[in-house]
Image: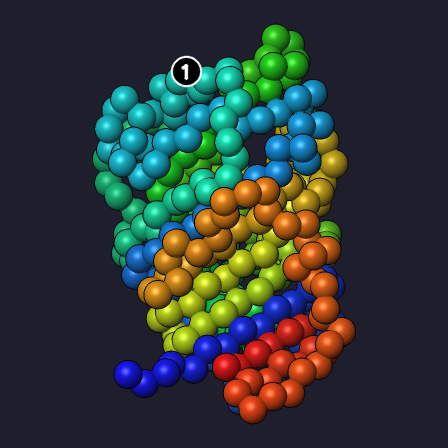
Amino acid sequence: MPILPFYRIRLGLPLVAALALSPNAMALVLNAPNSGTFTMNLDTVALAPYAGGYYLSTYWDAVAADPTDPATSGGALVGQVATAEIPALNQTFAITAIGGDIAGQAAQRFQQATSADFHIDTENLAGGTAGQVGLAGVQGFFAPNYPPNGAGLVNGDFAVRFDAARQNHGGSGWYLDNNIYFTMAIYDFINLSTSWIDADNWQFSGELAMSPENAGMLLGSALTDVGDFCLGTGSFAGCGQVSAVPLPGAIWLFGTGLAVLGGKGRRMTIFGSEASHV
């Protein structure tokens, strides 16, 4: 059985530090995914200061959050947000099909389709402003001290998008949008990394930073690292699953100053950009 080549590139912040410095021979444009998963692991300690106490309490997967079911309207889901905290690891959202948005969605629901023009340029980890990856599923958060008497909040009908203008406030340009009730950036993506076998088998991962928009609504600090994510398609679907508390970002970055040459593989690091080919 032939061994497929495997590539990996990692960009730290600021994003521009590594532009045009990754090996051109490894560059590839990753295609819009036909299927796959987005896995989110949230840091409960980092979330706690928001809204005077803020935690994940409810999760609806793609089936339970079917946007065409009237019982899953935004208002209905808010009414079902539990008050007890649940584990915030391995929150998995299915990638939606490429095409148009589903017709006949329940009130306040706006599940997004994945667009055919979505792409990731592995040379600089940039994307196109028009493209997106839609995600199926909803999260419920409870904030017992949110003024005036506590509140349940829902985030979902997510879309992964790119906007270079978001680099101006310290993000990478990539972010996760909420689309229930209204469209708003929830998390900016930072410390990005991608691995791929080919244009249809890849993963895109990094850390979740509280977006300025969401931080303002939750009365907290912007761009605080509150977790990590992994978007995977093809043979990388299901990436990002953990069995324990995720390692801090500093551990992931350990050793980025090393350069290793061997008979079977190469690793090269240039200003926070790491690429490897095995």
In the rendered view, would you say 220 is above or below 42? Answer: above
* Quarter of the image where one finds residue 30: bottom left
- Residue 90, visible in the rendered structure: yes
Q: Which residue is mark 1?
A: 79
What is the crowding at mark 1: few (fewer than 14 residues within 10 Å), some, or many (at least 20)?
Answer: few
Whole-percent x, y for residue 163 in the image:
57, 58
- Judge left or right: residue 96 versus residue 244: left
Whole-percent x, y for residue 84 in the image:
51, 17
- Residue 27, visible in the rendered structure: no
In depth, the one of 130 and 83 nearer the eye is: 83
Residue at horizontal 69 percent and vertical 57 percent from the top: 251
Residue at horizontal 25 percent and vertical 24 percent from the top: 70
Instruction: Indicate the quadrant containing the N terminus: top left, top right, bottom left or bottom right.
Output: bottom left
Amino acid type shown at disc 1: Gly
Residue at horizontal 54 percent and vertical 58 percent from the top: 205
Q: Secondary structure at mark 1?
A: helix
Residue at horizontal 52 percent and vertical 35 percent from the top: 88
- Judge left or right: residue 34 versus residue 217: left
Q: How is the image coloured?
A: rainbow
* Quarter of the image where one finds residue 62: top left
In the rendered view, would you say 12 is above or below 247? Answer: below
Whole-percent x, y for residue 19 in the image:
67, 76
In the rendered view, would you say 11 is above or below 154? Answer: below
In the rendered view, would you say 100 is above or below 185? Answer: below
- Judge left or right: residue 111 versus residue 70: right
Whole-percent x, y for residue 152 in the image:
51, 19
Please give the count of numbered marks on the rendered protein.
1
